[in-house]
Image (cartoon, helix red, strand yellow):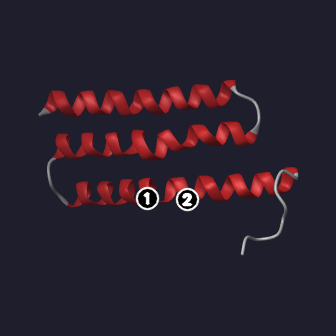
Amino acid sequence: MQTSAQVLLFIGVAVIVASSWAALWLRGVLVRLHYLSPVTTIGAPLIGVSLLLANGWGLSTGLILLTVSLLAGTGPAIAVAMARVMAQREGITPSESPE
């Protein structure tokens, strides 16, 4: 059980580090914003499951899983909203709201 928790933790941290390095390397806000999605949809849930396996069930584990599920559920929607605002500011899309 401990080995699988460590493997999941390593993979989750590796995804987050790789996304961070790629975001630093690329130019442009809209391009960098694409590298936020793996952090919220892959990296954080892997780390959350790793903590679940390492700690077992309990109140702290429940709070960790609640936080991770909120992050995984709202992360992509927040990224899309930020991309739309940045595209409107840069003049790529019209500033009117969709109907």
Mark 1: amino acid: Gly
Residue at x 58%, y 58% (from the top left corner): 78
Mark 2: amino acid: Ala
Q: Nearer the viewer, residue 31 or 49?
A: 31
Q: Nearer the viewer, residue 78 or 24?
A: 78
- Return the mark for residue 83: none
Q: Is residue 40 above or below residue 71?
A: above
- In percent of width and height, residue 87 lies at 78, 52
Residue at x 51%, y 26% (from the top left corner): 18
User: How dense is the environment of label 1, judged by Cα within 10 Å: few (below 14), some, or many (20 and up)?
Assistant: few
Q: Quadrant of residue 32?
A: top right
Q: Nearer the viewer, residue 40 or 56?
A: 40
- In percent of width and height, residue 54 lies at 18, 40
Identity of the residue furthest to the front in this view: 99
Q: Is residue 97 above or below residue 35?
A: below
Identity of the residue furthest to the bottom in this view: 99
Asked if residue 84 lies left or right of residue 39, the reply is right
Tag 1 secondary structure: helix
- In percent of width and height, residue 10 lies at 33, 27
- Return the mark for residue 77: 2
Are discs 2 and 1 less than 8 Å apart at CB? yes
Tag 2 secondary structure: helix
Residue at x 70%, y 27% (from the top left corner): 26
The total of numbered circles placed on residues is: 2
> In this figure, which residue is indicated by the disc labeled 1?
73
User: How dense is the environment of label 2, judged by Cα within 10 Å: few (below 14), some, or many (20 and up)?
Assistant: few
Asked if residue 88 lies left or right of residue 70, the reply is right
Q: CA distance from mark 2 to mark 1?
A: 8 Å
